[in-house]
Amino acid sequence: MVSALGTTIEGMSSFLRSAPRSSFATPGDSIQLSMFQLTDRIIGSAIKIHRRLGPGLLESAYESCLAYELDSQGLRVCRQKAVPLIYERVKLDCGFRADLLVEGRVVVELKCKEQLHPVDEVQLLSHLRLLNLQVGLLINFHVVRLKDGIRRIVNNYREEAIQQ
C-alpha cells in the first residue's frame, strides 16, 4: 500500500521499527516549550494521527506514529522508557515502562480499549512519581472522538516560572 507521500506503509513501518527505540531526534534538535505548549503539541499530534488512522489499530502502531510525528516537530522522544523502582535504597528492574517520554518532561501513556479505568490513571501517576515528573497524558485511541479519550494527569504540579 502506498501512502500519499509515495512511500509504502510497509517501508514506513520498517523505518519506525529499525529506528533506535531510545530516541528519534538528536539532542541539538530540542526546542524549549512551556508545559502547556508541549502538551498542546502532543495532543495536537495525537488528534492528527487519530483523524488519519481512526480507532482500531494496536497500541504499538499509534506509539510509532506519535513518536514519528513528534520527532518531525523537533521534539526529543524516548520510546518504552524504563521506569526504575527504588525500594529501600535498592534499584529494582521490574519491567515498568512508559510508552513515551517527550522532552524528558511529559510521560505519554497510550491505550486502545473500550474505556479508560481508574487503574490506568494510577499507572500513569505511578510512572510520574517514580520518574519524578509533574505531567502526564493518558491517551485512549479506541474512541470515536479522540478528545473524549485524553486525560491529563498531574503529580505535585508547580507552575513554571515566567521567563522574561
Image: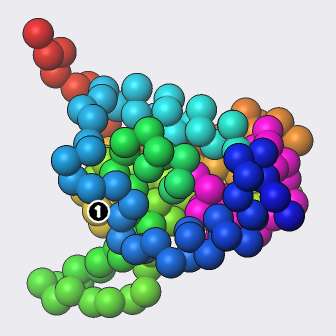
Q: Nearer the viewer, residue 23 or 7?
A: 7
Which residue is disc 1 drawn over?
131
The reply, left or right, for residue 39 in relation to residue 128 is right
Quadrant placement of the N terminus: bottom right
Q: Is residue 125 visible?
A: no
Q: Which residues are magenta?
A: 50-66
Q: Residue 138: within the magenta?
A: no
Q: Quadrant of residue 135?
A: top left
Q: Amino acid at mark 1?
A: Leu
Residue 37 position (above or below residue 31):
above
Residue at far front of view? 6
Where is residue 102 drawn, in percent x and y? 38, 50
Q: Is residue 75 visible?
A: yes
Where is residue 71 drawn, in percent x and y? 44, 49
Quadrant placement of the C terminus: top left
Q: Residue 55: within the magenta?
A: yes
x 27%, y 35%: residue: 31
Residue 55 position (above or below residue 163):
below
Give the mark count: 1
Residue 16 position (above or below residue 116):
below
The reply, left or right, for residue 160 in relation to residue 65 is left
x 73%, y 52%: residue: 6
